[in-house]
Amino acid sequence: MQYLAIIGVFWALTALTPVAVLITDGYLMGALFATMAFLAPTANTTINTYLLLLTPDGLRGRMSSVVGVVIGMAAAVGPVLGGAFVQALTARQAVLACTAGVAIVTVLATLSPTLRGFRQHEADGPAVVAVQEQEEPNPNGRIGEMDDDARYEVLRNDEDQYSLWLAGHEVPAGWHRVGKEGTKEECSAYVDEVWTDMRPRSLRERMDSAAQS
């Protein structure tokens, strides 16, 4: 679903951009641009959610900074290129040139292995993490090697993310027992049942607050 939401936005923008050639009324042009602007947050929210889920806690600040720089550069370069097109080409040609650029990006996004990999994440469900005695729980990984005969317990951190931990060992700071203990299969099944929203709690709260405002 997330993959389709992202790619759907790209294709919708590709289809709507050339419509500007056919519009002469200012109000209709404003409505077109508003529709295109409202589409972008759909893809941005999905992408940002995955970035936060897949990025280790210690690297999220750097990741957010890099994303902010890239978005800022795109916001600055885009109007410059648009102005150059308008000066060098007719209005119709400028719109069609922009359409071609958007279409290229759309095709690349559709063929992107990273975005296509979102389907696999959706099919797999929540990522349950195997941890060893000396390691810290990591809610961003995937199931690793685990002893089928060992006893595990389910931990949850302050962001409502889950992990498996060898039973009987001291729980690391920031993690809490949820009262579930058993085999790997039993604990994994429990996590799959209760971890239905993989967004960190802080992200959910921000998104819910933004939706209500």
Image (cartoon, rainbow, N blue to C red):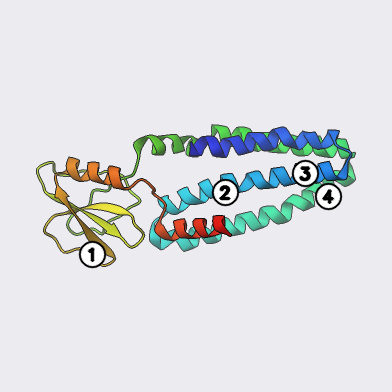
Q: Nearer the viewer, residue 196 or 188?
A: 196
Mark 4 — residue?
A: 83
- Dividing the picture into quadrants, the one containing residue 145 is top left
Q: Residues within 10 Å of mark 2 (few under 14, many from 20)?
A: few
**First in sequence: mark 3 or mark 4?**
3
| Type of the residue with mark 4 | Gly
Mark 3 — residue?
A: 31
Q: Which one is in front in this view, the residue at disc 4 or the one at disc 1? A: 1
Secondary structure under tag 1 reads loop
Q: Residues within 10 Å of mark 4 (few under 14, many from 20)?
A: few
> Is 82 left or right of 191, judged from the image as shown?
right
**First in sequence: mark 4 or mark 2?**
2
Marks 3 and 2 sit apart, C-alpha to C-alpha, by: 21 Å
Residue at the image point whose x is 56% and y is 39% from the top: 6
- Most distant residue in the front direction: 212
Marks 4 and 2 sit apart, C-alpha to C-alpha, by: 25 Å
Residue 115 image point, x, y percent: 50, 38
Q: Residues within 10 Å of mark 3 (few under 14, many from 20)?
A: few
Circles 4 and 1, Cβ within 8 Å, touching? The answer is no
Mark 2 — residue?
A: 44
> Is 34 left or right of 199, judged from the image as shown?
right
**First in sequence: mark 3 or mark 2?**
3
Marks 3 and 4 sit apart, C-alpha to C-alpha, by: 21 Å
Q: Residues within 10 Å of mark 1 (few under 14, many from 20)?
A: few
Marks 1 and 3 sit apart, C-alpha to C-alpha, by: 53 Å
